[in-house]
Image (cartoon, rainbow, N blue to C red):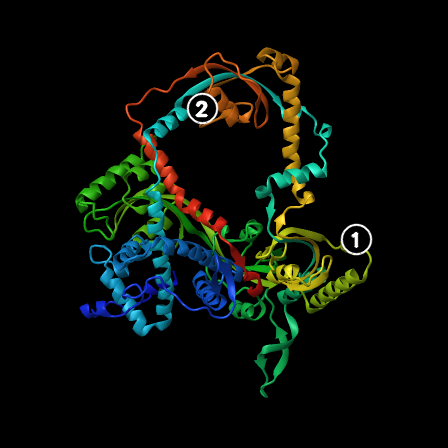
Amino acid sequence: MAILGNIRKQTTVLILIIGLALFAFVISGVFSSGDLGGGGGKVGSSVAEVNDNEIPIDAFRQKVENMSRRMGPTASTMQVVNQVWDQEVRSSILGEQFEDLGVDIEQDQIMNFIKTNPGYSQNPQFTNENGVFDEFKLKQFIADLKINSPDQYNIWLQDEASIIQGAKEQAYFNLIKAGVGATLKEGELDYKLANEKLDIRYVRVPYASVADSTITITKSEISTYINAHKDDFKQDPARDIQFVYFEEKPSAEDEKAVEEAVNKLLVDSYGFDETKESEEGKVINDTVIGFKNTTDMADFLDRNSDIKFDTIYQAKKRLPAQFADTLMSLKVGDIYGPYRDGDSFKISRMMGRRANGSVKASHILIGYEGAQRANPEIKRTKEEAEVEAKRLLAETKKKDVVFVELARDNSDGPSAANGGDLGYFQEGAMVPKFNDFAFGNQVGTIGLVETDFGYHVIKVDDKEDIVQIATLAREVEASEQTINKLFTDATQFESDSKNSEKAFSDSAREKEFVVRPVNKIKMMDENLPGLSAQRSIVQWAFNEDTELGEIRRFDVDNGYAVVQLTAKYEEGLMAVEDASATVLPIIRKERKAAQIIGANKGKSFDDFAKDNNISASNATALTVKSPTIPGAGSEPLVVGTAYAMTAGETSGLIEGETGIFMVNLTKKDEAPKLDNYSTYANNLKSAAASKVNTAVYNALKEGAVIEDNRSFFY
């Protein structure tokens, strides 16, 4: 919450105690005797209507604005709108339930709810000296906001409304959860389904044994299936488009021009030197020193480069990976480039090198009571710490001892978990004595050093050179000429496509443009593959005045898109063409099942296997709760059928997920009986209760009548 971010910035809040009279102060709905549910009249048009309850657009926009501030600049407008929409619809739907059932919240319940929110209960601003949440401090803070920070106080009011809503939801769902339970018999059944083991022999004739080409399905049959399963084939309004993207990117000429410009800056030239003036104050002709010879690198790069001069010495791993080996091999004064690195042309010059300027070391820290930053749990004396450190130093000299393991088991430092590894560091990063040992000894040296932190058994693991490199960089950008040509090409293609009798895709292909389709765009979609956030295109596609086949050019990020509307899908049942990809496999499977069953009806287990040229297979230790048959996959109906059989019994033909089965139950291991099945019953109850919040709300939402007007406003 935005309010919490500001809480941490307040330095004077709560310093002065306002007094007990504060509790009589009218802070807001939470701490007053008024209606805790909020309210407000209808202003302007409505963004939605939920079961005849309108959500005013003005209030909605205000909440979008507040939410946008909280989510920050990385969230797009539609992301914010959709989040506020979900909250408002939920609040409206559940609000009806609260009203019908008389669900209300008292002040103490709200405060108890706040205590369950770590953002408040664990915030140091609102805890006492024992770290316990203090509601008095929260009330003081809110009072201070109301007097001194009206804007932040208004944000708090939004938070307060969310708190009230959350508290009511908690009470409402807890009422429902109170009616959720499981009997001991249900617990016993659940135990048996998970623990009774089945061994079977089975024969499976896979559906794939019947070729798809032998199954003929008509459009009429697909239509009949759709109408018989309407709930599975509902569709929201949607649109299909196709587009050509004219991306604003540098041309080959632009790249060449930047490379040449970088090359010119490499060497000295004769011309106007803007850093020098004549006696009359005018810029004079002079030799302009280039990158290769400049003695004031910082000034040169400030004037000529997209990258400033970095005086910090860097290790090899900090350099661009592709060029690191080459750059590290340069001598002081050497030049490398121009070279292309990402979107820039660069030239690099070696300014300085420090041999072994970076050291990698590990250590074992032995602290003592009173040492700097010592763990309070450490009670050893300084003398005891020295003895222990010398013992460990002696251990490191033994052949079979691994320093990493010794550090992990004995070090008091935070690096113990990493085997004492401190990574690479440069001169001055460590305290003087530690620094001098690490840089003054060869790789592999192990020694003992005392600092204010304790005694260190140090191992020098590695050393590497570090370098100071100056880089002249110029980003390759599209020139004005390239941008103008891009606009001309996009405009011309738009005009040609509108006026040509050829198909949009054919016109694009003639000009070697790439056509990209985007299918089933929803009314509130924002991101389009290949174009990112393009809300204006979605709005155009859903505009009632936009005709099928219409073409329009749009300004988009880094260029232009010429877009054609290719299909419209209205709310209701899917058309046969749109549903066929889903329906055809289902009907084929049904036909294949009927065909296999018809050809094998009445056959024995052995005949079923023999006549279909299939060998019987075995599966052991199957359970109903884990109904996966090795070699066949998940087959709950097959395993469930076997569970209901007695040992030695053979099933009839079973229509499984992957084929037609016949099963012989060879063995059934009963689960050991328990004295009490309450644990399993409680697990069932907990599992059911955990689904209440989501399941109940989804059911209420599905039954609600929601009129969504967002697309008219956003």
**Residue at left 23%, top 50%?**
374
Q: Nearer the viewer, residue 627 or 182?
A: 182
Residue position for label 2? 623
Task: Using the image, tell me which numbered label, if any, was put on residue 630.
Answer: none
Q: Would residue 149 appear left or right of 134 to someone viewing this image?
A: right
How many residues crowd mark 1 within 10 Å: few (<14), some (14–19), many (20+)?
A: some
Q: Nearer the viewer, residue 366 or 349?
A: 366
Q: Secondary structure at mark 1?
A: helix
Which residue is at the front of the view, 427 or 500? 500
Residue reaching furthest to the front: 100
- Can you tell which quarter of the image residue 512 is in? bottom right
Which residue corresponds to mark 1? 506
Sooner in the amino-acid sequence: mark 1 or mark 2: 1
Specify the quadrant that holds the C terminus: bottom right
The residue drawn where x is 61% and y is 39% is 228
The spot of residue 479 in percent (x, y) is 68, 67
- Residue 32 placed where, x, y %? 27, 66
Taking the view exactly as shown, the residue that stands out farthest to the bottom is 280
Name the quadrant containing residue 614: top right
Residue type at mark 1: give it: Asp
Residue 29: name its quadrant.
Answer: bottom left
Residue occupying the point 62% across, 11% down? 607
Q: Please say if 18 is above or below 126.
A: below
Q: Residues within 10 Å of mark 2 (few under 14, many from 20)?
A: many
| Mark 2: secondary structure | loop
User: What amino acid does circle 2 point to?
Assistant: Thr
Instruction: Find residue 400 and report its horizontal and vertical position in percent.
Output: 34, 30
From the viewer's perspective, tell me whether residue 703 is left or right of residue 585: left
Q: CA distance from mark 1 to mark 2?
A: 58 Å
Please give the name of the residue rendered at 35% of the width and 43% of the height, measured from the top-left corner.
Answer: 177
